[in-house]
Image: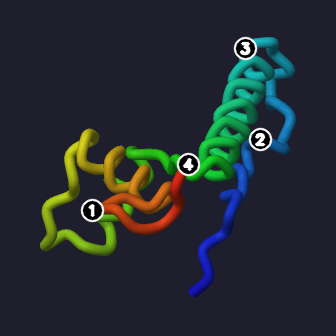
């Protein structure tokens, strides 16, 4: 199954608030900004740790998820080539 680069926004983002209140609009704007930030992080190769933990809990409950520091290091190495191989600056 192919993973989407940008996750679909929740359905409630497109629906107007039932009561027409400003608070509903603020919440929707906050969710849209959150989706945009997640998309930007994916573009630069820094996926969300919370998404990773949720993925591990749902699909790999028998495995221990990496700590945040391990996750960050792992993603940097995957992006920039750690361990002496891969991309180099000069």
| Tag in front: 4 or 1 | 4
Residue at 55 percent across and 48 percent down: it is 89
Of 16 and 19, nearer the camera is 16
Left or right: residue 30 versus residue 78 is right
Left or right: residue 56 versus residue 14 is left
Residue at image mark 2: 13
| Tag in front: 4 or 2 | 4
Q: Residues within 10 Å of mark 2 (few under 14, many from 20)?
A: some
- Place of residue 23 in the rendered image (x, y in percent of width and height, measured from the top left): 72, 14
Residue 25 occupies which quadrant of the picture? top right
> What whole-number distance in Å separates the C-alpha atoms at marks 4 and 2?
42 Å
| Tag in front: 2 or 1 | 1
- Place of residue 31 in the rendered image (x, y in percent of width and height, measured from the top left): 68, 33
Of 90 and 56, nearer the camera is 90
> What whole-number distance in Å separates the C-alpha atoms at marks 3 and 2?
13 Å
Provide the secondary structure element on which disc 2 rests: helix
Do residues under tags 4 and 1 come within 8 Å of each other at their CB atoms?
Answer: no
| Residue 57: mark in rendering | 1
Provide the secondary structure element on which disc 1 rests: helix
The relative height of residue 21 versus residue 39 in the rendered view (above or below) is above
Residue at 81 percent across and 12 percent down: it is 22
Q: Earlier in the sequence, mark 4 or mark 2?
A: 2
- Place of residue 44 in the rendered image (x, y in percent of width and height, measured from the top left): 63, 47
The relative height of residue 36 versus residue 58 in the rendered view (above or below) is above
Left or right: residue 39 versus residue 77 is right
């Amino acid at each position: 199954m192919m993973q989407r680069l940008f996750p679909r926004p929740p359905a409630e983002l497109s629906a107007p608030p039932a009561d027409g209140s400003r608070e509903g609009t603020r919440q929707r704007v906050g969710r849209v900004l959150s989706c945009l930030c997640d998309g930007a992080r994916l573009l630069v190769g820094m996926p969300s740790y919370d998404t990773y933990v949720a993925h591990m809990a749902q699909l790999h409950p028998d495995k221990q998820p990496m700590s945040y520091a391990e996750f960050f290091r792992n993603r940097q190495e995957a992006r920039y080539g750690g361990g002496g191989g891969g991309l180099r600056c000069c």
